[in-house]
Image: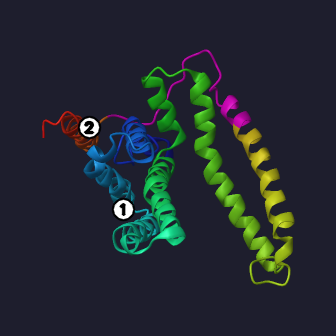
Amino acid sequence: MELLSSSVRKSLLDPRTKLLLLTFVSVIVLGNAGGNYANEFRFVLNYLPLFLLLVSHRWKEFLYGLILYTVGYAMQFFLMPHVQGLPGYLVLAVSGILLRFLPGIMTGAYVVSTTTVSEFIAAMEKMHVSQKITIPLAVMFRFFPTVVEEASSINKAMAMRDIKFGGSKVFKMIEYRLIPMMTCSVKIGQELSAASLTRGLGSPVKRTNICKIGFGWADFVTFALLAGGLVFVVLRACKVI
């Protein structure tokens, strides 16, 4: 029963659609492609990852993103016109970081949290991507969630020893938190690489996969939205609209 349930698709979007969305967010929002012609499209791309996180029941990430977006837009539209000099540059920098970097982070969080390694590998194989690229990316998909779990465990252990902000041993935080985190990260990377090779990712024989991937209605809606936004930006840049 567990084997059969693992083949059922649990994510709204196909992994290939998620990667395309991540590319658009990185180029349009973070890279500022299109300039002022893409402001409306950029606004849509800012909130699309939040909508996907909400649909995927990732309440914590959704609330964090919504609050930070609200702060960024409030600083840009209400605070920036009334502040000049150094405070104005600081407001501009903070709002710019929130509105430029946060959408990519939110999209990456959605992709990593809703895509299994098997789905990702199956998508890469369907796109005929080389294993030299697939294997490191597959390791990355398991690396970051595992590192977050290790960091949480280290923080809890150090908090029991009063090594925290506001504690009596606050100056030992770097030694007792950062160094164990670095050691665990190296060990996790080595173990995940070995596990990937053990599962046959480096074999020249074509692997089989039981996970179900494919384009659905949500993927086509996303394609239409991205294509429509791109056409809109091009037409505005050509002074057609």
Q: Quadrant of residue 7?
A: top left
Q: Give the image location of residue 84, x and y in percent.
A: 45, 71
Front one among 152 and 237: 237
Front one among 50 and 130: 50
| 222 lies left or right of 33 | left
Q: Give the image location of residue 205, x and y in percent.
A: 59, 15
Residue 176 belongs to magenta span: no
Q: Would you place residue 44 above or below residue 173 in this image?
A: above
| Residue shown at 49% from the left, 36% from the top | 120
Front one among 29 and 225: 29
Q: Give the image location of residue 97, x and y in percent.
A: 50, 58
Q: Which mark is residue 54?
A: 1
Front one among 45 and 77: 77
Sequence-wise, the earlier of marks 2 and 1 is 1
Q: Give the image location of residue 57, x and y in percent.
A: 40, 62
Return the residue found at the far top.
204
| 205 lies left or right of 211 | right
Q: Would you place residue 147 above or below residue 228 in this image?
A: below
| Residue shown at 43% from the left, 73% from the top | 83
Return the residue found at the far front.
85
| 100 lies left or right of 179 | left
Q: Quadrant of residue 75?
A: bottom left
- The nearer-to-camera label among 2 and 1 is 2
Disc 1 marks which amino acid?
A: Leu
Query: What are the residue bounds of the magenta stretch?
Result: 193-214
Q: Would you place residue 179 above or below residue 142 in this image?
A: below
Disc 2 marks which amino acid?
A: Leu
- Disc 1 element: helix
Return the residue at label 2. 230
| Residue shown at 82% from the left, 77% from the top | 170
Quadrant of image for the C terminus: top left
